[in-house]
Image (spheres, coloured by chain):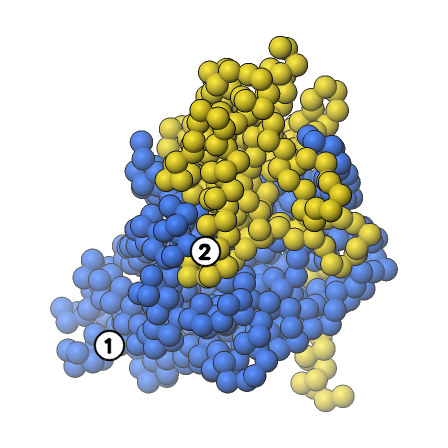
């Protein structure tokens, strides 16, 4: 082996040793230390902000869910359960195709552009569905009142929130289906509406899971 | 308060926070890289590596260190993925396929973090924390080391010595990135980012039936993903995933983490060359471009042009309710004008012009403020070019910081500037000319072209974000984007270090009445002009075929 090749091998050896030593610091020590602190100080949050209702875990306050009727025979896709508030569409959500022993939700967006015919169709259909679903006797949804978040998919497909406008749109339907008054349900939405953090960070929103848990409590009380 | 005002206030709050922090952090960084003392833990590390921290390196030796360390990184990360199936803590995930493992290894070592895989279903705990997250630290430390070497080139004279690569690497990691990332990670975990080593587990749902959750050391990886301008998400949805970015506050904090080191480094530069005003001229250039791009992005996103958005009543496709349009716009600009590539909303579903702004941010060379280290050296090379152009106009030998910009210097700067455009345009042209790569696009047309242009722009500039409608997990894209990332990272470094060596060897030229003052607003203006003109001339035809065609049709 000539000199320069030997030199290269030595240098690569130093590179590899540097990598291994720094792996110990940043790939073992650092994550373990952060895990220790996080688990010690705020375990619930570090484990995924689970929410319990009636003593059982019903999900995470951070992860959006679907509120569907039990699947019916002859129907491919289960229909949304009209008793509950619904979240945003999630057309970008996937299911895993590697390691299929898990049934993972793969977070993701549709990645369709504003000029995409498919997206135009999804938005148009979602709008019609929102209008139809939420129009109840005595209350007709005006298509121009349907907010953008009700007809678009989020970036993660797991958005736990909807805008206060979309929640308000669902109040009449939810009230009618649960035998509650519109005022009661409207108040519920108002109570669960979070404003912007410090008045200017982010957007006003309603957490759908928390809202439905509160709704369930209200129904149980009646 | 309307959403537009809230967006503007978030941008102002961010600017204020950065203005407060850049001074102490920039000065501290200068001390870290100038100090003669070694911490005890650092001495242990040098012993472990088997190097003498006292050795002073000329530019070829410094470059060999960079390349050897990075080659070891690619090799190690590739093997780690290829053997995942038999390693512990893999959650039962199998080995990653060869082309994808190559692409991912290169991607993380080059600070790009392009991901052709789904984090949820591909990478177990071991590869994530001991493989990918490690490169988040070290690739950032390498970037800072090269930037500091260039700064030393300006600061030193009549020596060829640029410092010791191993010392710069270890100090950047141990003294800067690990402490800052620890603070950031704890803050994120306190706000709801998960941090555990659970496997995939089932959790009940409201209407019955289970949901399956991934566990993971997400907060610790998230903090360095942003701080090191890496951008590789733990989950596929990246910073849009609520477990990575749960609240409006964490979102703003994440943007802050992305920008804090890049906006502090000009101060470090100023301190090290002995004139903080020189640093502020660079900082002003970066800040002006960043603010202008944020304003443009907010304007186009709030005006939501495009058939689907007009029907929907807003450009909320691919955006989360908790962030809204304003904060998503700030994030998109900050991630593409640095080499981060993390996303809290999906650029493919931005308006046509919005997608173009994201692309242009990368095409400027990611220098406003740019990636950790790479932003500063990219902008300094641009400053050398601007000085040269100004010198041509008035017919004087150009000089910058007392160093003559002669034939050799300007050749090196020009080569540096040509690398990424050549990669982006040639590879995009190849992909469009070949029959199969186009099949990976969603929808075809102007947007399909944009998806491919975006992919190579993102790879060659080491950004890592995507117009993710492109199915990039094919042999062609894994390989060519992998090559674009490698060449786009290391060729410019070769030119930068050669430039640094050549500058450090010069004797300083005295300042005279005829010297172009590079610490004045006039120079910042010249620099902004040079940046925009060079990128504009290079990329306008390509942009016209993609995002401009889409945006103007809307």
Would you name the residue on which mark 1 appears? B389
Q: Secondary structure at mark 1?
A: helix
Query: How many other residues sit within 10 Å of disc 1, few (<14), some (14-19) or many (≥20)?
Result: some
Q: Please provide percent x and percent y for residue B124.
A: 75, 53
Label at residue B439: none
Give percent across and percent down for residue B306.
37, 57
> What residue did someone put label 2 on?
A120
Quarter residue B398 falls in: bottom left
Classify residue B161 as left or right of residue B397.
right
Colour of chain A, in one word, is yellow
Chain with blue colouring: B
Question: In the visual, does A85 lie left or right of A138?
Answer: right
Residue B485 occupies which quadrant of the picture? bottom right
> Which is in the foreground here, disc 1 or disc 2?
2
Quadrant for the C terminus of chain B, please: bottom left
Q: Tell me the chain of label 2.
A: A
User: Where residue A50 appears, x then y in whole percent?
Assistant: 68, 30
Label 2 secondary element: helix
Q: Are marks 1 and 2 on the same chain?
A: no
> In the rendered structure, the residue with mark 1 lies on which chain?
B
**Residue ID at (20%, 80%):** B392
């Amino acid at each position: 082996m000539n000199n320069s090749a030997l030199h290269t091998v030595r240098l690569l050896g130093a590179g590899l040793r540097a990598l291994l030593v720094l792996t110990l610091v940043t790939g073992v020590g650092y994550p373990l230390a952060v895990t220790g602190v996080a688990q010690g100080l705020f375990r619930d949050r570090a484990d995924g902000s689970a929410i319990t209702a009636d003593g059982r875990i019903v999900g995470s306050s951070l992860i959006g869910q679907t509120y569907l009727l039990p699947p019916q025979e002859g129907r491919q896709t289960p229909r949304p359960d009209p008793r509950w508030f619904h979240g945003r569409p999630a057309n970008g959500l996937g299911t895993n195709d590697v390691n299929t022993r898990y049934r993972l939700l793969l977070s993701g967006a549709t990645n369709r552009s504003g000029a995409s015919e498919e997206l135009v169709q999804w938005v148009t259909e979602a709008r019609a569905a929102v209008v139809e679903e939420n129009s109840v006797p005595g209350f007709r949804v005006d298509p121009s009142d349907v907010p953008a978040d009700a007809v678009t998919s989020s970036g993660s497909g797991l958005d736990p929130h909807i805008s206060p406008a979309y929640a308000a749109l669902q109040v009449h339907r939810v009230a009618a289906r649960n035998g509650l008054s519109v005022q009661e349900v409207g108040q519920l939405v108002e109570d669960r509406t979070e404003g912007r953090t410090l008045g200017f960070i982010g957007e006003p929103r309603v957490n759908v899971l928390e809202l439905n848990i509160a709704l369930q409590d209200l129904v149980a009380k009646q | 308060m309307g959403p537009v005002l809230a967006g503007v206030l978030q941008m102002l709050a961010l600017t204020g926070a950065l203005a407060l922090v850049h001074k102490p952090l920039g000065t501290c960084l200068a001390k870290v890289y100038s100090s003669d003392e070694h911490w005890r833990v650092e001495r242990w590390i040098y012993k472990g590596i088997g190097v003498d921290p006292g050795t002073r390196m000329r530019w070829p030796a410094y470059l060999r260190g960079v390349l050897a360390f990075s080659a070891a990184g690619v090799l190690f990360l590739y093997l780690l993925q290829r053997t995942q199936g038999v390693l512990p803590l893999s959650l039962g995930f199998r080995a990653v396929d060869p082309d994808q493992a190559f692409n991912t290894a290169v991607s993380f070592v080059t600070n790009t973090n392009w991901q052709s895989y789904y984090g949820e279903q591909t990478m177990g705990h071991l590869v994530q924390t001991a493989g990918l997250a490690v490169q988040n630290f070290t690739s950032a430390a390498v970037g800072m080391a090269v930037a500091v070497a260039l700064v030393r080139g300006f600061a030193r004279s009549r020596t060829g010595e640029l410092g010791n690569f191993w010392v710069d690497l270890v100090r950047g990691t141990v003294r800067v990135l690990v402490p800052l990332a620890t603070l950031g990670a704890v803050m994120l975990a306190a706000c709801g980012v998960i941090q555990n080593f659970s496997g995939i587990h089932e959790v009940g749902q409201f209407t019955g039936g289970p949901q399956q959750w991934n566990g993971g050391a997400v907060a610790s990886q998230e903090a360095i993903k942003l701080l090191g301008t890496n951008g590789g998400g733990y989950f596929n949805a990246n910073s849009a995933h609520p477990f990575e970015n749960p609240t409006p506050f964490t979102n703003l904090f994440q943007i802050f983490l992305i920008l804090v080191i890049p906006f502090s480094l000009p101060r470090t530069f100023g301190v090290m060359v002995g004139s903080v005003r020189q640093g502020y001229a660079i900082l002003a250039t970066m800040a002006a471009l960043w603010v202008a791009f944020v304003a443009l992005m907010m304007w186009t996103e709030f005006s939501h042009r495009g058939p689907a958005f007009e029907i929907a009543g807003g450009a909320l496709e691919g955006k989360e309710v908790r962030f809204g349009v304003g904060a998503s716009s700030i994030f998109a600009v900050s991630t593409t004008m640095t080499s981060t590539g993390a996303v809290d909303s999906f650029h493919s579903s931005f308006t046509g012009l919005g997608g173009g702004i994201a692309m242009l941010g990368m095409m400027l060379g990611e220098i406003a403020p740019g990636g950790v280290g790479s932003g500063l050296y990219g902008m300094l090379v641009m400053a050398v070019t601007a000085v040269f152009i100004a010198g041509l106009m008035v017919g004087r030998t150009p000089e910058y910081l007392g160093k003559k910009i002669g034939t050799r210097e300007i050749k090196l700067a020009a080569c540096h500037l040509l690398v990424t455009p050549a990669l982006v345009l040639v590879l995009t042209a190849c992909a469009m000319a070949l029959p199969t790569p186009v099949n990976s696009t969603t929808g075809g047309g102007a947007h399909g072209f944009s998806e491919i242009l975006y992919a190579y722009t993102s790879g060659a500039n080491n950004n890592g974000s995507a117009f993710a409608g492109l199915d990039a997990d094919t042999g062609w894209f894994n390989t060519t984007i992998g090559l674009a990332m490698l060449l786009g990272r290391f060729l410019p470094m070769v030119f930068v270090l050669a430039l640094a060596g050549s500058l450090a060897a010069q004797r300083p030229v005295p300042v005279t009445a005829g010297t172009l003052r590079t610490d004045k607003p006039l120079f910042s203006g010249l620099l902004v002009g040079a940046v925009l003109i060079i990128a504009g001339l290079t990329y306008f035809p390509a942009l016209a075929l993609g995002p401009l065609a889409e945006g103007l049709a809307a």
